[in-house]
Amino acid sequence: MIYMNFNELNHPYRYAVERIVHGFEIYEQNADVSACLARSASAGSKLEASVFLYDELVRLTGRTLPWGIFTGVHPIRFIRENRHNLGEFRISPERLQLADEIMAVQDVRTNPREVFHLYVGIPFCPSRCKYCSFVSESVTKPSTQKLITPYVDALCREIAAVGEYSAANGLTLEAMYVGGGTPTMLPVTAQSRLYAAVSSVSAQAVREYTVEAGRPETLTDEVLAAIKAGGATRISINPQTMNDETLRIIGREHNSTDIYKAYEKARRFDFAVINMDLIAGLPGEDCSCFTDSLNKIIALEPENITVHSLAVKRGAAVKARSDADFTLIAHDILTAAGYVPYYLYRQSNCAGDNIGYTRGANVSRYNVLMMDESSTVLAAGCGGATRVFMSDGSVRKHYNFKYAHEYISRFDEVMNKFEKIHDIP
Ligand code: SF4
């Protein structure tokens, strides 16, 4: 098998055409596709080249792509901004309908010059899930274990600096999200220190405060009590699937019984919103396996359910076609059960979508505004992406280190970011 090498492709719109070709699950060298690519290179614009290539690939494969030639990760924002000019983008009627449903419940505008969102990243997990594409280190390694205390020390200092920066610039904290990684795998004392540091950023109660409790096996009574005492109103418990054999295959260290126990325990702590994540297209799972998990989660009645599509690595055995179906199947089941879709994003190499659903008025402002890229975000910790809106309409961005050892050893550079983003004029 010879993979198509786009690095060697001399094409004025290489990135766009590569995304379209891979959208059709074409990874191997293919003479017909190469000929189409060569012809599309002489098009007068990126749009023209994309439309030509797309139409040719539809003809060659007999397939269409749900989002047509749109290859970005934020289709909802794109559709909102271009609603009356989408004719050439070949977006399917089902996706346009889905986008309209989502936009109808996304009424969460905010002023990014007055309020901000705080993201806090924990780059550790109890073990690595086999499908994971995030930068998160397993604490099964003693060398990683040793990083936990210095990391939390440094993180608390960065969070305090965020508080000073926001106060100096008149920004009010509206929503915060402690994620990663698995924050709830930290020792309880470290979690309590962290939640105290986070709470000190804002003098008044924050409108929305989420802690990602991704791995159900980490949710002891002590951990839940620490999260609750810290002031969080939302937690996310992530089963991914309710099938025990799949959980074993993907390297999770919990089973479905642990998920039920964690959920029941969390309910006793009276969080306003519990979100549960599922992944469509996991190895070995067909449609009935996925819908069985989905129905089991719906029966628990969490306020939010998020359905992700498994991102497909290039060159891997691909199941993207059925992923696309899962998106609509999940939508039909969830809407019939009273949930509505409220935010959506895509990942590269992923045919399906990632969609958050809510029951009742439990839309997460943080999720909507993050996907819209329309809020000021001050991020602390590994993987954090800071985004500040300036008075001239420009946006200043800063990305923290991805790995804990870098974050700790180069912490001076982390703190220097506040000089780079400056006071907001
Ligand atoms: S819990 Fe989440 S971040 Fe951690 S390894 Fe699994 S998928 Fe990755």
Image (cartoon, rainbow, N blue to C red):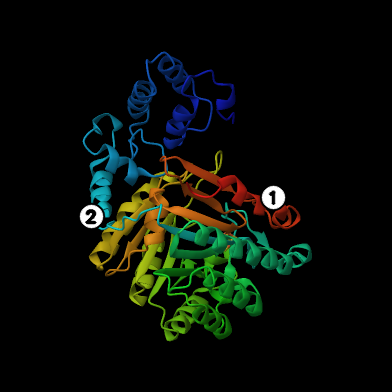
Residue 243 or 423: which is nearer the viewer? Answer: 423
- The residue type indicated by label 2 comes to Ala
The mark found on residue 104 in the picture is: 2
Residue 12 pos. (x, y %):
48, 19
Image: 270 above or below 235: below
Q: Is residue 285 left or right of residue 130?
A: left
Image: 205 above or below 96: below
Q: Secondary structure at mark 2?
A: helix
Image: 52 above or below 205: above
Q: Where's ligand 1: which quadrant?
A: bottom right
* Residue found 29% across the figure and 63% down from its top: 334
* Residue found 45% across the figure and 53% down from its top: 376
Say whether residue 251 is visible: no
Q: Is residue 318 left or right of residue 58?
A: right
Q: Contact (CB < 8 A) between labels 2 and 1?
A: no
> Rounded to the nearest whole Å, what is the CA distance between mark 2 and mark 1?
42 Å
Q: Secondary structure at mark 1?
A: helix
Residue 329 pos. (x, y %):
31, 56
Residue 87 pos. (x, y %):
23, 31
Say whether residue 419 is visible: yes
Identify the image quadrant of residue 321. Answer: top left
* Residue found 45% across the figure and 27% down from its top: 17
Mark 2 CB lies closer than 8 A to ligand 1? no
In the rendered image, which residue does mark 1 sit on?
413
Image: 395 above or below 415: above
Residue 239 pos. (x, y %):
48, 68
